[in-house]
Image: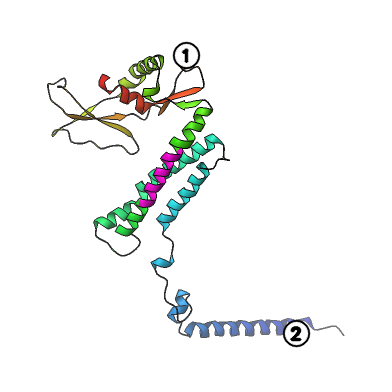
Amino acid sequence: MSPDFSEINVNASHGTASSKEAAVAGVQAARDQPVPDTALLGITPGLTAPGLSDFLNRDHCILAFNERVFDWAARADVPLLERLRYLSIVSSNLDEFFEVRAEPHITAVRNGETKGPYGAASLAALAAKAHDLVARQYALYNDVLVPALAAKGIRIVAHGDRGSAQRRWVHDYFVREVRPLLVPVGLDPAHPFPQVANKSLNFIVRLKGADAFGRENDIAIVRVPRALPRFIRMPASVAPKGRHFVSVSSVIRAHLSDL
């Protein structure tokens, strides 16, 4: 005798409907039950709610990340130019950190806030970590990377270390490429301190004598255009051994009296 498939289907559909009704009833019953506050917070009964001390401060974590990047720059088994690149990344990240992340802390201190993740204590801790990291940057660059680069024939030659031929070349470069782009802006009651562009290189200089209009100005600001390269390679005619560079800041500083 063959089975009655129509009867099986009817019974199955009835069973499915009953299961759905039971499931809906169970959901409604669970929904109507009071939910304790500790369950909402995911806390075991008897424990306290998490506070700020239970979480890591995001800004301190950012500085900790940059410390790990610095550790790569300090590793002797990393290629030399890669170490210099890691150190540059740390410097760039710190610039961005104080542009973006430090501002809420400074604002909170100015407003006298004492609670929450921002305030004088947090700002002081961030400043201490940042100053320590910057000091380690300079020590690594000046005491380790610069001598290692020099051993490979790569030097950034300071003004006091340049020979007479190198100084003549630097002076000619300044007159030809740099001086036409520099415009000192005098500071006086009629011309207050100008807006300084973000991440720009500027000099504050003390002036002597009067300008073209006979005005006596004591102080001026000289902004270095971004179009100028920060480092200039000297030609082989004045630096035959290795690759020697001069920084544009040292070039300008040595010739401020020519402006």
Q: Secondary structure at mark 1?
A: loop
* Quarter residue 2 falls in: bottom right
What amino acid type is highlighted by mark number 1? Ser
Q: Secondary structure at mark 2?
A: helix
What amino acid type is highlighted by mark number 2? Glu
Q: Considering only vertical position in the picture, is 69 above or below 251?
A: below
* Quarter residue 41 falls in: bottom left
What residue would you read off at disc 2? 7
Q: Is residue 211 magenta?
A: no
Quadrant holding the C terminus: top left
Neighbour class for label 2 at 10 Å: few (<14), some, many (≥20)?
Answer: few
Q: Considering only vertical position in the picture, is 227 above or below 16?
A: above
| Residue 233 location (% of width, % of height) | 45, 22
| Residue 19 location (% of width, % of height) | 63, 83
Of residues 12 and 72, the one nearer the viewer is 72
Q: Residue at x 36, y 23 (%)?
A: 160
| Residue 64 location (% of width, % of height) | 45, 52
Of residues 21 and 217, the one nearer the viewer is 217
Residue 259 appears in the rendering: no
Q: Is residue 117 left or right of residue 238?
A: left
Q: Considering only vertical position in the picture, is 209 above or below 85?
A: above
Which span of residues is magenta-colored? Answer: 128-140
Q: Residue at x 36, y 49 (%)?
A: 100
Residue 226: image tag: none
Could you tell me how far apart the alpha carbons at marks 2 and 1 are, in whole angstroms? 103 Å
Q: Is residue 129 magenta?
A: yes
Quadrant holding the N terminus: bottom right
What residue would you read off at disc 1? 237
Q: Considering only vertical position in the picture, is 57 above or below 23?
A: above
| Residue 171 location (% of width, % of height) | 35, 17
Q: Residue at x 51, y 19 (%)?
A: 241
Task: Tell me the mark number nearer the camera, choosing from 2 and 1.
Answer: 1
